[in-house]
Image (cartoon, helix red, strand yellow):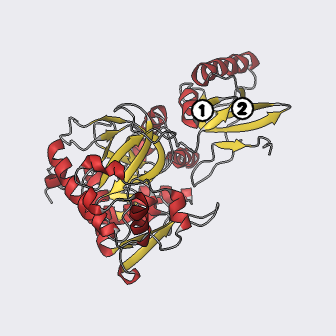
Amino acid sequence: MDKNSEYLHPEFETLNVSEIRDLQLKRLKDTVRHCMQSDFYKKRFLEAGISPDDIKSLDDLKKIPFTTKQDLRDNYPFGLRSVPLEKCVRLHSSSGTTGNPTVILHSQKDLDEWANAVARCLWMVGLRPDDVFQNSSGYGMFTGGLGFQYGAEKLGMLTVPAAAGNTLRQIKFITDFGTTAIHAIPSYVTRIKEVMDQVGVDPKRDTKLKTLVIGAEPHSEAQRKRIEEMLGVKAYNSFGMSEMCGPGVAFECKEQNGLHIWEDYYIVEIVDPETLEPVPEGEIGEMVLTTLNREAMPLLRYRTRDLTRILGHDCPCGRHHVRLDRMKGRSDDMIVLRGVNIFPIQIEKILLEFKELSTNYLITLTTDGDNDNMTVEVELEELFTDDYSRLEKLTKDITRALKDEILLTPRVKLVAKGTLPVSEGKAVRVVDNRKVYE
């Protein structure tokens, strides 16, 4: 491990596009054959009238049917495994609040490869063995805890498994242990800064923080910049999902110009979520992923429901693994209001253009008479109740900007800081109270 190298795994990180494609094809063929140990894929291939021998090129991937979250639920708990259960050493699962949870199985090899991928991501943004890495993710079934834990340990850093919540303790750990890097979801970073202000801790003066890893919930570039300014750090966007192991699927490099998805681990497709046909490169669509080196439970053409676009392959950092835009939302998170498609991230982008506003907001959808309406409540950074004309003008300016962005006029309510609920898990941004007519 050469601390001065820009690459942790140069034999994979510096591959050119042609070399990446050759490696992908070899691994795809191996993965498809391995999937035939799974009752699910054996049946799926039979129904589609194809066999592993039909996969002769990367273009042949489209012959394989999509895999969905519902497939995982319908085959709960272990119906998609491709190895005997006794070879599996861990599982992660979703909460299952809307039915059977989705279960992902891991062999020891899978865990080792996962740790390698996360370590590669952290090294890419400049972290080294002499850093102190604090993880504020939940542990247990949530993959962000153990995923970053094992990756940080693989890299050789002193790790602080702080877990979620207890913000005062988080701050104490940051100051006492000399934490230089922290992983947190964007909305919780704001909470950490608020409590720092309350207890008189200046992150730029009183801590050694320099690197922040953010992910797990959509956030805008404006929110990232605000976070960087608040804490005096560089904040790097991370993407992962439990079905693909967890964190480590894609990560920004120091250029912060898109997330490199590790193409020696995954094949990425961008498709129209309605037609399921490929979209032209550069257009937004639903990301579909195929695992290339998973042993216990490989997934073929998994519909992630995450919306993004391909930005390109070349990057000043020297890596040619394709770059993805930050997630624009999810195809199943889309708000349809009066026939207009809206994503919460569009609203957040506008709100963060106003310096008078905090980062905490709530979108509420209601039915009034025969009409569906949207109310956007957003906290003020500071309360100026004695200047009603200023409040009125600010409300009108925000409403106008939102209308220009989403093509509808929402109700905008400015509220005092601390009024809206704060979650130390994923922030709840949308409450849908509309009437549903059967």
Q: Position of residue 194 (x, y in %)?
A: 57, 44
| Residue depicted at x 74% and y 15% | 389
Which quadrant of the rendered structure holds the N terminus? bottom left
Q: Which of marks 1 and 2 is in front?
A: 1
Tell which circle, 1 or 2, labels the residue nearer the N-terminal end: 1
Q: Residue 11 sits in which quadrant?
A: bottom left
Q: Residue furthest right?
A: 369
**Marker disc for residue 387:** none
Front-lying residue, 39 or 356: 39
| Residue depicted at x 71% and y 21% | 391
| Residue depicted at x 64% and y 17% | 400
Q: Residue 254 sits in which quadrant?
A: top left
Q: Is residue 262 left or right of residue 71?
A: left
Q: Which residue lies furthest to the front in this view?
A: 49
The residue carrying pointer 1 sits among few (fewer than 14), some (14 to 19) or many (20 or more) residues within 10 Å by Cα, namely some
Identify the residue position indicated by label 1 in the image.
342
As shown in the figure, which amino acid type bears the numbered disc 1? Answer: Ile
Q: Position of residue 303 (x, y in %)?
A: 46, 51
| Labelled pair 1, 2 in contact (Cβ < 8 Å) | yes
Element marked by disc 2: strand
| Residue depicted at x 17% and y 40% | 318
**CA separation, marks 1 and 2?**
11 Å
Front-lying residue, 350 or 211: 350
As shown in the figure, which amino acid type bears the numbered disc 2? Answer: Met
Q: Where is residue 267 in the image (x, y as percent from the top left)?
A: 31, 50
Element marked by disc 1: strand
**Marker disc for residue 374:** 2
Figure check: 230 above or below 268 = above
Q: Is residue 18 left or right of residue 286?
A: left
